Every structure is written in structure tokens, then in C-alpha cells.
Image (cartoon, rainbow, N blue to C red):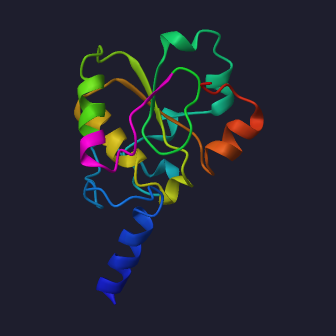
Amino acid sequence: MKTALSLLLLAGLFSCTGNTQEKTPATAPVSDTASAEVGQLEPWKESQLLEPGELAARTDLSATHIFNIGTAGSIKNAIKIGPASEIANIETFRQQVSTFSRDAEIIIYCGCCPFSDCPNIRPAFEVLNELKFKNPRLLNLPKNLKADWIDKGYPMND
């Protein structure tokens, strides 16, 4: 029974990316900054969730470090990394953010599916925690990018 449950969880964890390239481990370690505020232990705290309207209301998005770490479209001024569940992409992300000040606000998002099913946000947020960033943020897209950003008319890259 335990094996069957593990296989079901693993299958669900990788269902959003739609490709078969090498993935990061399904059970990424949870950092010391994890919080049960979001309903389960996650590598982010509820206070680190950034509401879409708050980000969209910022007048100068070019001064913000936004990373698309999934397969969904790119919001305005986001840097496209690709699915963070793929080892090559998470390493690219690690290299890019390692050049920033540890005080920089870094915002990540995926938007491929609900947070509970997303294989990309946890590995990317873990990188931010491991590198000891003081202001990591996760764009709060609990359903997906379309429902929580695009359908609200928020800015996308052309």
C-alpha cells in the first residue's frame, strides 16, 4: 500500500511539466524556514506569498527580479528559466540568482497547475532558502497562471 501511494504521489508531482527530461528528486528537503501556515510543510512561509494584484500594481516591474520557473507563459519582465523540476533548469536558476545581493527580492512563479500539484515551485524556493536570500517570494497562483493572472488582465511579456 505504501509503495502504491508513493507511486501515485510521484506521478502527480511530475504531471505538470509534460516532458520526460531528468527531474529533481520528488521529495525535496524542507528547509528550516518551512511553515505549516500554508496547510502543509512547505519551504515558504505564508508571509512570503505575493498576491498577483500587488505585483501587477507595481509601476516599475523592471526593477523586480521575477523568474518563471515553470512551463506557463511569462509575465511582464519575468526571466524564463523553464521547469525547475529539471536539473539543468534548477542549476541555471541557481547560477542566475547567485549573482544577486542576498537582500534582493526574488519572485518566482510557475502557474502550470495548483500549488499542491506543482513540481517546480518547491525546488526553486529551496534554492533561494539554501542561498540564504532574505526576501524570497512566491507569486500566489493557487489555481494557475491563466486563472490567477492572465484572466485578470495583468501584464504579460509580448
Instruction: State left or right for residue 75 relative to residue 96.
Output: right
Q: What residue lies at 25% left-to-right and 53% top-to-bottom?
A: 29
Q: Quadrant of the C terminus?
A: top right
Residue 33 visible in the snapshot: no
The correct choice, above or below, for 81 with respect to 10 in the image is: above
Residue 148: give x, y in percent of width and height: 68, 42
Comparing 125 with 73, the one in front is 73
The correct choice, above or below, for 21 with respect to 74 in the image is: below
Comparing 45 with 140, the one in front is 140
Instruction: State left or right for residue 125 relative to residue 38.
Output: left
Q: What residue lies at 70% left-to-right and 46% top-to-bottom?
A: 147
The correct choice, above or below, for 110 with respect to 113 in the image is: above
Q: Quadrant of the N terminus?
A: bottom left
Q: Is residue 84 magenta?
A: yes
Q: What residue lies at 39% left-to-right and 58% top-to-bottom?
A: 19
Task: Provide the residue span drawn in magenta.
Answer: 78-89
Which quarter of the figure has residue 74? top right
Instruction: State left or right for residue 155 relative to residue 61.
Output: right
All told, the count of numbered labels is 0
Comparing 39 with 137, the one in front is 137
Residue 32: give x, y in percent of width and height: 27, 43
Residue 129: give x, y in percent of width and height: 29, 35
Residue 22: give x, y in percent of width and height: 25, 56
Q: What residue lies at 29% left-to-right and 18% top-to-bottom?
A: 102
Residue 86 visible in the snapshot: yes
Q: Is residue 146 magenta?
A: no
Residue at far right of view: 152
Residue at far bottom of view: 1
